[in-house]
Image (cartoon, rainbow, N blue to C red):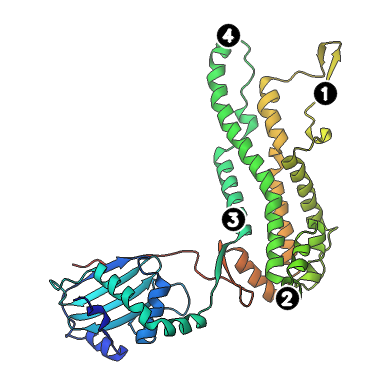
Amino acid sequence: MEDYFLNLEAVHPSCLAKILLGDKLPKGGEVWEFTNEIKPIDLYSYLYAKYGQPNGMQNFFRSDDSDNLIHWEWALAGEYGLTLIQGHNFRTEVHLIGDFKGKALTLESFITQIKSDIGNYGRLISELRKDLEKWTQFVNPYQRISSAVNQHFKKLNELNISPEEDKVPQPKSADDMALYQERWKSVAEKYSFAVGLIFGLRSMLPVLAESFVNLILFMLCKKDIKNNERLFQNVLRQPIDVRVQSLHINCIGFEEQIDYSSKECRNFHSLMNERNDLLHGNVEVNKLAIGDVYFRGKVPIFLEYQDFWDRSIGVSLDSVGFKGIYKDHEAVIEFIQHIMSKLNPEVRAEVALTTGRRQLGLNKKNGRLGVLLPEHMVDFRPVYK
């Protein structure tokens, strides 16, 4: 049966419904699965060119969007029964319904026959491909950073950091010294992990806000600017305060200018400055100071005594700003909300939908930005008895 799958015929949906729902449904069959042995776009284009638009029953069950279990299906009839070809989220399925047992038909023969026939429909396939919209999927940088920030805060909360309760007091006796090392090791590991999380958060929070501003520019920048690469890159490379204050000039959808002297913008700008010092290793003694000590020659004379906790874990917590990390997160949220409040309601709703998606799509031909696929990707397999 070297050409069985090349001689199939499309079944009209009304006839197919009578077959599937009636008492003449052929008994027996099997299901084949494959992924990229034939790329889904090549298989779809070939089937469309040869048989016309998808005619399987699953096309009538799908919702009119990209959130479906089965996206397309062709129903074809042959000597031994029905061949249903379906496009899923993660694979292509071929359902054989009928008397196929012992006919020496295999998935490999199906793939080989289809591949051998694709070239015969090259012109029609090329014409069809011209009508397809090509979208480039890309990761939403704002949502990527937002997810990382949320995960860091989740882990930090799970540690349940409380320096007042966790502090290991300086040993004052031999008995205290015997237990000190074990207790200290346990607490030190916990706080070392916490310091790393807080450092990461302090680095990411200003970036979270800046990535939001950049996403707004990418989404809403006026066409005459965005279509000119030099102009658009010039906008993106402006200092962050200039980018924010000129959003109403460079973008559509803003009802009023953003006042950079507002509390929300001032708090954000302070975070940006602190982030720069942190990441660039700037030596700002006033910001890095942890206390004073006097010397007479080479003799240290302490202003006040601190225990081992204060000089190690306490210093680490203070240096990464543990006490203010939740307030800084709130400042970023308020800054983003402040920008959103300046958009007209229709655009604001669109921005809220887009910023919350992990993956977006860009149609490079017309510059359209879109949400292509649902956040959840579902799968299923039927069980036959």
Label drawn at residue 127:
none
Spot occupied by residue 94 in the image (x, y as percentages of width and height) = 28, 72
Q: Quadrant of residue 46?
A: bottom left
Crowding near the residue tagged with mark 1, few <14, some 14–19, many ≥20 C-alpha atoms within 10 Å = few
Q: Residue at x 81, y 71 (%)?
A: 249
**Discs 3/2, front:** 2
State which mark lies toward you, 4 or 2. Answer: 2
Q: Nearer the viewer, mark 3 or mark 4?
A: 3
User: Which amino acid type is shown beneath numbered disc 4?
Assistant: Ala
On the rendered structure, is 128 left or right of 96? Answer: right
Apparent side of residue 194 relative to residue 343 in the rendered image (left or right): left
**Residue drawn at the location 70% of the way across and 23% of the way down:** 311
Q: Is 356 in front, or is 32?
A: 32
Q: Is residue 129 above or below residue 215?
A: below
Which numbered dot is residue 144? 3
Mark found first going from the N terminus, 1 or 4: 4
Q: Nearer the viewer, mark 1 or mark 2?
A: 2
Disc 1 is placed on an element classified as loop
CB of mark 3 within 8 Å of CB of mark 4? Answer: no
Work out whether mark 1 precedes mark 2 in sequence or the reverse, and give the earlier one.
Answer: 2
Label whose residue precedes the other's in the sequence (4 or 2)? 4
Q: Quadrant of the C terminus?
A: bottom left
User: Is residue 279 placed above or below 108 in the rendered structure?
Assistant: above
Type of the residue with mark 2: Lys
Q: Residues within 10 Å of mark 4 (few under 14, many from 20)?
A: few
Q: Distance between the Cα atoms at labels 3 and 2?
A: 26 Å
Q: Secondary structure at mark 3?
A: helix
Residue 292 bears which disc, if any? Answer: 1
Q: Nearer the viewer, mark 3 or mark 1?
A: 3
Residue situated furthest top in the rendering: 174
Q: In the image shown, does 291 or 125 lie closer to the viewer?
A: 125
Mark linked to residue 174: 4
